[in-house]
Amino acid sequence: MLAILGLITIVVLLIVIMTNRMSPLVALIAVPIIAALAGGFGLETSKFIISGIRAIAPTAGMFVFAIIFFGVVTDAGMMDPIIDRILRVVGTRPARITMGTTLLALLIHLDGSGAVCFLITIPAMLPLYERLGMDKRILALCVSMAAGVNFLPWTGPMIRSAAALKVPVTDIFNPLIAVQGIGLLFIFTVAFLLGKREERRLGLNTATAGVGGDGAPVGPAPRVLTPEQIKIRRPKLFWVNLILTLFIMGVMIEGAVDPVVMFMIGTVVALMINYPDVKMQKERVDAHAKAALMMASILLAAGVFTGIMGGTKMLTAMAQSAVAFVPPDMAQHIPFALGILSMPLSLLFDPDSYYFGMMPVIAEVYKTLGGDPIQIAQASVLGQMTVGFPVSPLTPATFLVVGLCGIGLGEHQKFSIPYLFAASVVMTIAAAILGVIPF
């Protein structure tokens, strides 16, 4: 009975989210509560909800303060010299431009926001692509690869997977650091080879690399800051902010202090250093509050869902029923198979549906068969809404990429999907070879 009720709950959740009949926030709260009441759990449901929220609170707190912290140091101008330096170094050689595009997108995506990454990187690099006659699909691919492989502990998929399994995000991320490094090596190699291919296609050499199709000299487009941006910049504090950021990230990844604590401390220090005036501190927090609140509310709603699904034992009952259909000798291959399929699954499931609906069931089945559920989360983040999100029609970021680059959705998907899928496969194989997940 519980297994059937759990299955119905999952199916209804997927349907109402994917058909836009309910927002993820509403669905993650309403659907499991109705299911629990229908299952006869009554007022005990509230205990399950509190338990789920309590388990997920540190993750939600980390995400909120990570957004504010990176927002503050970016407002202060920490990224400006880095961006300007990259634009100067890339020059007008396509191979340098493609690698510079990838590096710039990688750095901008440190705050975990794909939209911000695309809004800054693409307008900065697009003039070079247009003046040299380079394929703008390559620009779209480079920023997509960089944002996709950059699955840091405070990015959406990592946060969701940790919240769904109620484990510290560092338990999922730290074993994947070397795997991510291999993924980064792969995407920079792809970017370089595509750049060299463009040089051959355009017939560019050292003598003609700085000349556009109209014969005029080509150079990086200067970045122009608005008066509002100039007002909040703190260029003299660049090194202070950079050292603070590296320290926060280093301590967090090392695991000496809980991530939520580090980002809370980092946010306080960044605000006091850059904006000692109380009014400006409030303005900087308000500027990033919307993004922080939006994701935090979804994570707390996910706590309701996971708390009820776990407390009522629906998840356990579903897993026990599913185990009968999985041959014991095939159990160890589940993470590897999921890693291979994770990127294509981005085209079928939005992140909330997958990480809060599908992944917990798969993880529970794998746990029942003797595996470590964390390996399911690790396999998932190697592609599902990481390298898959910039081409998924289920995410607004995809349309932002094609809109900013001035290309069609179809041509972007046709060109980028093979490379993004290859990045996911390479990282999955690397994870298996390094022993993060079993073959």
Image (spheres, rainbow, N blue to C red):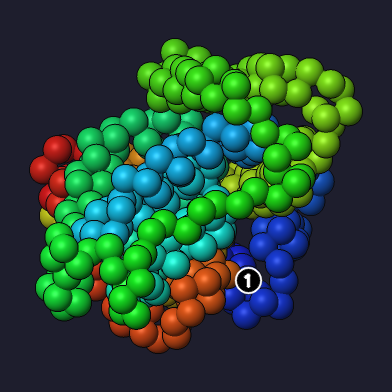
**Tag 1's secondary structure?**
helix
Q: Residue drawn at (43%, 61%), measured in percent from left and top?
A: 125
The one of 251 and 61 positioned closer to us in this rendering: 251
- Measured as percent of width and height from the top left, residue 88 is found at 37, 46
State left or right for residue 136 relative to residue 260. Answer: left
**Vertically, is 394 above or below 112?**
below
Q: Residue drawn at (68%, 17%), measured in percent from left and top?
A: 273
Q: Amino acid at mark 1?
A: Ile
The one of 301 and 412 positioned closer to us in this rendering: 412
- Measured as percent of width and height from the top left, residue 313 is found at 55, 48
Q: Is residue 390 visible?
A: no
- Measured as percent of width and height from the top left, residue 37 is found at 75, 58
Query: Residue 328, located in which quarter of the rendered image?
Result: bottom left
**Vertically, is 51 above or below 415?**
above
Q: Quadrant of the N terminus?
A: bottom right
Give the residue number, with chain letter if any, for mark 1.
17
Query: Residue 219, located in which quarter of the rendered image?
Result: bottom left
Mark 1 closeness class: few <14, some 14–19, many ≥20 residues within 10 Å: many
State left or right for residue 277 relative to residue 316. Answer: right
User: Extreme right residue here?
Assistant: 279
The one of 309 and 75 positioned closer to us in this rendering: 75
Q: Is residue 261 visible?
A: yes
User: Extreme front residue here?
Assistant: 216
- Measured as percent of width and height from the top left, residue 140 is found at 39, 68
